[in-house]
Amino acid sequence: MPKQAYSILYISFLLGLLFSCQGEEKPPFSYPLRTVESEKIWDRAFHNAFVDLIYFKGKLLCTFREGDGHVTGKKGKIRVLQSSDGTAWKSLALLTKDGIDLRNAKFSVRPDSLLVLTGLGTDYRKAVYEWFTWVSYSEDGSVWTPPRRVRGIPSNNWFYDLTWQGGFGYAIPLIAGTDPLSGKVQGGKRRMALFRTADGMNYEQWTDTLALSPLVGEALVRFKPDSTLFLLIRDGGAHSVSGYYGSAVPPYDTLSIVPFDHGLGGPNLLLLPDQSWLLGTREWPEERLDCLNERLTVFMRVEEDGRYRRLFVLPSEGDTAYPGLAIVGDQLHIAYYSGHEGWPSIYYSQVSLGNLYTW
């Protein structure tokens, strides 16, 4: 066969491969997506992950877990960094609890302006024997109360995120079963309901148990200026390629929930000044049509009917996502973690809001 014929066949093969990757498109998007650059700001532990970010009293505060592995680490500590502009960061605090792996810390601000950290505490003892949600308070981000268990939620609970509205904080805890013989957490038997608190420590169940799968995970609650509640819930265990979204109106005792056609690995949802929703989350290869085989941290605009459109990705690969988001002026500040340069490390990015509106 002539060399020219081989070239034509090869080009035809490449074109066929390209169209096969893009032929089963679901929500509208195109690849390659734009990549927003980032800078590494912390890598001093073996595994640096599960990030959050807040703008508090004129400073950016970034928190994350330092541990020895993604799941089965036994030495998880919560680090807090501070920066005035995102350029230079300094360590502000380190939270620990003897015998407990602390992880997934999230910032919120109580109505009395007290800074709150909540997260997951895990007692491994060679197996997972307990989950519990902990809370810690600070006036300045540097001095924190010892992490203590919250009250009012059944045992083996953890909520991913706490959001305040109208004098109360709202969260959707993951509540797992307990094996009656071994005492171990039954991670495959999970249920959820909306809870609320007036102080961050003491909680009351606010809705009936939600009709969801037994593999639900991270759940977050957000509010619009008109007090409408909006929520996202991860589903499917570790390899999440689906979830739930929903809404409610005051007094939030009834939630409307339907499936969401995208995985939610370490999600964050932010209401932008133009009243649109920005979602940052992990994306698995099978959720994309670009033939790449790596996990990414992706950002998308989400409509309240569940439709979404991808906007950009961050430099990321492997163990990644859990972005923290904060708006300061006309800039969106992002902190996240990724293993694309070796062991999982903490990265920082900045995006103009004007770009988000036009991309």
Image (cartoon, rainbow, N blue to C red):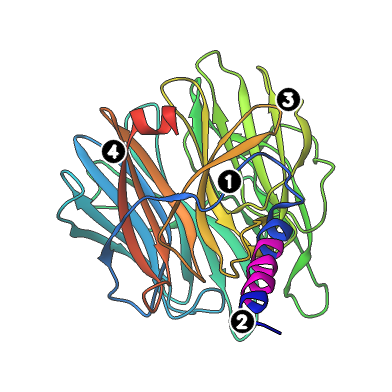
Nearest to N terminus: mark 3 or mark 2: 2
Q: Which mark is residue 30?
A: 1
Give how far apart the Cα atoms at labels 1 and 2 are. 33 Å
Residue position marked by numbered label 2 in the rendering: 3
Callout 2: SS: helix
Q: Residue at x 43, y 27 (%)?
A: 357
Closer to the camera in the image, 205 or 287: 287
Q: Do the residues under discs 3 and 2 have CB atoms within 8 angstroms? A: no
Give how far apart the Cα atoms at labels 3 and 4 are. 31 Å
Residue position marked by numbered label 3 in the rendering: 253
Q: Is residue 318 left or right of residue 6?
A: left
Magenta segment, prevailing SS (helix, strand or loop):
helix
Instruction: Measuring from the top left, give residue 299's x and y in whole percent.
Output: 50, 45
In the image, the segment drawn in magenta is: 7-16
Q: Is residue 266 above or below residue 193?
A: below
* Residue density around tag 4, few if under 14, some if 14–19, many if 20 or more, within 10 Å: some
* Residue density around tag 3, few if under 14, some if 14–19, many if 20 or more, within 10 Å: some
| Quarter location, residue 284 | bottom right
Closer to the camera in the image, 183 or 103: 103
Count all numbered tags in the image, as a single digit.
Answer: 4
